Amino acid sequence: MNPVWIAIILLSYFGLLLLISRLTSKGADNEGFFIGNRKSPWYIVAIGMIGASISGVTFISVPGWVISSQYAYMQMVLGYLVGYQVIIWFLLPLYYKMRLTSIYGYLNQRFGYWSYKSGASYFLLSRTIGSAARLFLASAVLQIAFFDALHIPFAVNVLIIMGLIWLYTYKGGIRTIIWTDSILALMFLTALILTVILVMKDLNLGWTDMVGQIRESGLGKIFFWDDFGGDRKHFIKYFIGGMFITITMTGLDQDLMQKNLSCKTLKDSQKNMAWFSLSLVPINLLFLTLGALLILFARARNIEIPAASDSLFPMIATGGYLAPVVGVIFIVGLVAAAFASSDSALTALTTSVTIDILNKGNAPEEVTRKVRNRVHIVLTLIFLLVILLFRALNNRSIIDTIFTIAGYTYGPLLGLYVFGMFTRYAIRDRLVPVVVVLAPVLTFLIQHFSQQCINYVFSFELLLINGLLTFLFLWFIRRRS
């Protein structure tokens, strides 16, 4: 693919995002940065949530996942829908009732200082690793398609991308993000639809023919019911895992909840979440269909399917196998998805560090602003370092890596919130840091020895095991109050 086109795309994106930032950040104070002054239109937030949750990982990894898992991912998507109902009817009312800026303030009021700091620290760890993994994947593709042609090293590539994201987010925060993410989400959804249509056209398939070929190829299998113990793709494992991944990675995640808390009222926030959750079903189904079409295309053209599933979509889109316009559309969608997830994550992490870790939420306006700006810069550099670490170590599907990490890092948050919301006990707050370290360690040991001892292969239900262990340990350190 011609690097000139990629340069034009990147510069166009950058110019558009800076313009939006300039328009939306005028007069932005700390409350505007953190929660958009609670004036965000719910429908704009709903569109932006698609961009923040889908990300460049879904854009690349989910189509490639069809190689090994067919349409099994839809089992998780169905679990997502149940998880979103829990968020709509239990977590959002709690957050709005307490008028929280950081959702981890709940842990401070419910349990105490150490629970609060433990919860916020796990969010920082989870979101930093997860968001860096997402951006790593997009940066790796851009490196091959553009930066290598200019002999620019990967570290400089990531520094440029992080610098662009920092420039349009550092002033307006959420006030800017809800608008930029909405535009970026519409861009990558358009790119997804156009890519599906163009691949179908190249294969001379209509919609009915496409469905028939996917079914005949065996790639379209959704439900897996056999071998509960030995198959990671079993329906119950994926469905339960999807449900709790949504509750934790959305409902207990400052990044995605920060957008919801910027809505004017609880009712608006619930409408946003309802429409957003329903949209994920057809969107993810389309991503999987794209993956199946790419496999059919590779088979028809005798193209060797790559061992690394994340390489399938980039290889075919930018490798000259299709019309050049497909490569342009792919880069448009990839950059939009990568920016939409990373910018909101950087803003949420800045909010959490400033309020939860450094306790500057109630400081004078100017003091908070200065601290917030410094934190924003430091986190940008941390993102850079973690992405470089991923490049050195990663050798598996990124989306699988993210969900596996989530099982260990979001489990303690799940246990803390469930214990707080469904029991009336206080706890020995100083022991909570021990609990939230011990539970993931035991979860790892259970996963490691389960296949040898009981012939059971864990999947994403590790998150549930981790949360349950955290809950049990909290029960042991409870005290009546």
Image (tube, helix red, strand yellow):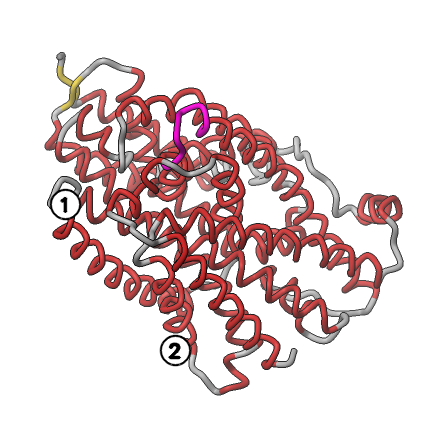
Quadrant of the image occupied by residue 474: top left
Please check the rendered image and state whether residue 102 is part of the magenta-colored stretch, yes or no. no
Give the foreground label among 1 and 2. Answer: 1
Give the secondary structure at mark 1: loop
- Residue 479 lies, with reference to residue 413, above or below; the image says above
Mark 1 to mark 2: distance in Å?
33 Å
Which quadrant is the C terminus positioned in? top left
Residue 445 showing in the rendered view: no
Q: Quadrant of the N terminus?
A: bottom right
Q: Which of the two discs, 1 and 2, labels the residue nearer the N terminus?
A: 2
Q: Is residue 465 above or below residue 26?
A: above
Q: Which residue is mark 1?
A: 360
**Farthest bottom residue?**
151
Which percent across, then down, holds residue 101?
Answer: 27, 36
Disc 1 and disc 2 in contact, CB within 8 angstroms = no
Q: How many marks?
A: 2
- Dot 1 amino acid type: Lys
Provide the residue span drawn in magenta. Answer: 262-269
Along the viewing direction, whichever of 309 and 443 lies nearer the viewer: 309
Side of 368 relative to 130 (left or right): left
The x, y position of residue 434, in whole percent, is 17, 37
- Residue situated in front as seen by the camera: 464 or 247: 247
Residue lying at 31% horizontally and 16% vertically, measured from the top left: 422
Q: Residue 306: percent from the left, percent from the top?
A: 65, 66
In the rendered view, does 147 fall on the left or right side of 4? left
Residue shown at the point (27%, 51%) measured from the top left? 350
Say which residue appears at 72% left-offset and 59% top-offset: 195
- Look at mark 2 in the image and give the residue it sits on: 156
88 in relation to 66, above or below: above
Three-letter amino acid code at the position of disc 2: Val
Which residue occupies 29% across, 34% down? 103
